[in-house]
């Protein structure tokens, strides 16, 4: 699986003008399942992200995890993270998981974050979503399982 996480002061996601998920201080995570991924991949990625020390400690160093700060997460499905831009000008998405597998692994990923003690809200898989966030830092990190 692939994820782009952003350290945020707050973020929210809307579908058709209705807010369906939000987070306060914590993480906004864009996540994409690839064809070869399975439930173990989703769980590993969530566990890795929960432990990443990307929040400031008292000395101003990135030395605390989202768990350490009592933060929350907003998880958004983002199949375009599977984009292959190596040829031509139109990205290809053939390496992305099927919609059925992608949705299942997205749900497993979000459930794993929640089970690790991170309050987690989500977007709507496959929907046209509007995401708003304030990136804190800015800190943006690419992670793969």
Image (spheres, grey):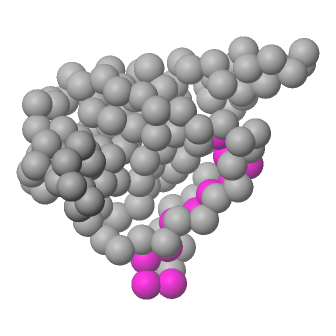
Residue 16 within the segment the image draws in magenta: yes
From the viewer's perspective, is residue 100 above or below residue 130? above
Question: Residue 119: where, in percent of width, then height?
Answer: 54, 41
Q: Is residue 101 at least partly visible in the picture?
A: yes
User: Which secondary structure class fits the magenta region best?
Assistant: strand
The image quadrant of residue 70 is top right
Q: Residue at x 35, y 27 (%)?
A: 144
Question: Residue 104: where, in percent of width, then height?
Answer: 18, 46
Q: Residue at x 51, y 84 (%)?
A: 17
Identify the magenta region.
7-17
Point out the residue furthest to the bottom here: 16
- The quadrant of the rendering that contains the N terminus is top left
Q: Residue at x 46, y 32 (%)?
A: 142
- In the rendered structure, the answer to whether residue 65 lies left or right of residue 14 reads right
In front here: 110 or 94?
94
In front here: 55 or 104?
55
From the viewer's perspective, is residue 80 above or below residue 139? below
Point out the residue furthest to the right here: 59
- The quadrant of the rendering that contains the C terminus is top left
């Amino acid at each position: 699986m692939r994820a782009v996480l952003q350290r945020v002061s707050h973020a929210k996601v809307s579908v058709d003008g209705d807010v369906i998920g939000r987070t306060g201080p914590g993480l906004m995570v864009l996540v994409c399942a690839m064809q070869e991924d399975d439930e173990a991949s989703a769980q590993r990625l969530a566990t890795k992200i929960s432990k990443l020390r990307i929040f400031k400690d008292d000395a101003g160093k990135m030395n605390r995890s989202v768990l350490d700060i009592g933060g929350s997460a907003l998880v958004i499905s983002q199949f375009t993270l599977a984009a292959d831009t190596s040829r031509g000008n139109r990205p290809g998405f053939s390496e992305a998981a099927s919609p059925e597998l992608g949705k299942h692994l997205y749900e497993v990923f979000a459930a794993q974050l929640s089970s690790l003690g991170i309050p987690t809200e989500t977007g709507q898989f496959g929907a046209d979503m509007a995401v708003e966030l304030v990136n804190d830092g800015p800190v943006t990190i690419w992670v793969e399982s």
